[in-house]
Amino acid sequence: MVKKTILMEDRPHSTSEWAKVEGSTVHGRGMFATQDIPEGQSIIQYLGERIDKEESDRRGNALFDESQKTGGAQVYLFTLDENWDLDGNFEWNTARLVNHSCNPNCEAQIDDDLNIWLVAVRDIENGEELSFNYGFGLDDYEDHPCRCGSKNCIGYIIADDYRPELRRILKKKKIKAEKKAAKERARLKKEQKKNS
């Protein structure tokens, strides 16, 4: 009997009885509930290749370099524990299409076997788009604008823990921009008086 090796790129697409892929106003495509989903329900497994931190850093840096050249690169790296990450950047990982929201209806949970599941954090209605908070850090927040449209959207994809600090940063930037604009208006007004 010949044993067939399945390459990472050739795996079958992940599926869920709870959700399907459709067009999304948030980011092109997303996953939507195919039926009412109760709070606590595991919806779909986030699949990918388990990689060590060194390889994760290499891939993450390569994606950053690509984004600097092209203006876009999706990151599907998940931290599993202190030794391992999961790279979900594969066509067959359907869960990678669940979009970010500042008011998510799902969260990523890691089980004892280091499998990632997207789990409903509240009841989700049939037809509703699934979402979770990607939880990015504060250092490069400007590289990750948010388009979720929720009432509490801060404008950037960041972890909840960083929201208060980002609010302070954005408030300082706004004050600085307003002061600069006021100085420019005053300069223009002075110039107009001088020329009249």
Image (cartoon, helix red, strand yellow):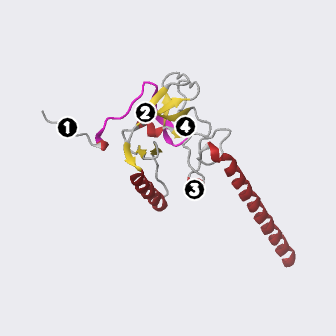
Where residue 11 sits: x, y (%)? 30, 38
> Crowding at label 4, few (<14), some or many (≥20) Cα neighbours within 10 Å?
many
Residue 45 is labelled as 2
Label 2, label 1: how far apart the Cα atoms are: 24 Å
> Crowding at label 2, few (<14), some or many (≥20) Cα neighbours within 10 Å?
many
**Does the magenta segment cover residue 18?**
yes
Residue assigned mark 3: 140
Label 4, label 1: how far apart the Cα atoms are: 36 Å
Label 3, label 2: how far apart the Cα atoms are: 28 Å
Q: What secondary structure is found at the residue carrying circle 2? A: strand
Where residue 150 sits: x, y (%)? 64, 38
Where residue 3 sits: x, y (%)? 17, 36
Where residue 169 sits: x, y (%)? 69, 55
Give the number of callouts: 4
Seen in the picture, residue 158 relative to 58 is either above or below; the reply is: above
Residue segment shown in magenta:
10-29
Q: What secondary structure is found at the residue carrying circle 4? A: strand
Mark earlier in primary sequence (4, 3): 4
Quarter of the C terminus within the rendering: bottom right
Residue type highlighted by circle 3: Asp
> Crowding at label 1, few (<14), some or many (≥20) Cα neighbours within 10 Å?
few
Residue assigned mark 1: 4
Residue assigned mark 4: 132
Label 2, label 4: how far apart the Cα atoms are: 13 Å
Mark earlier in primary sequence (3, 1): 1
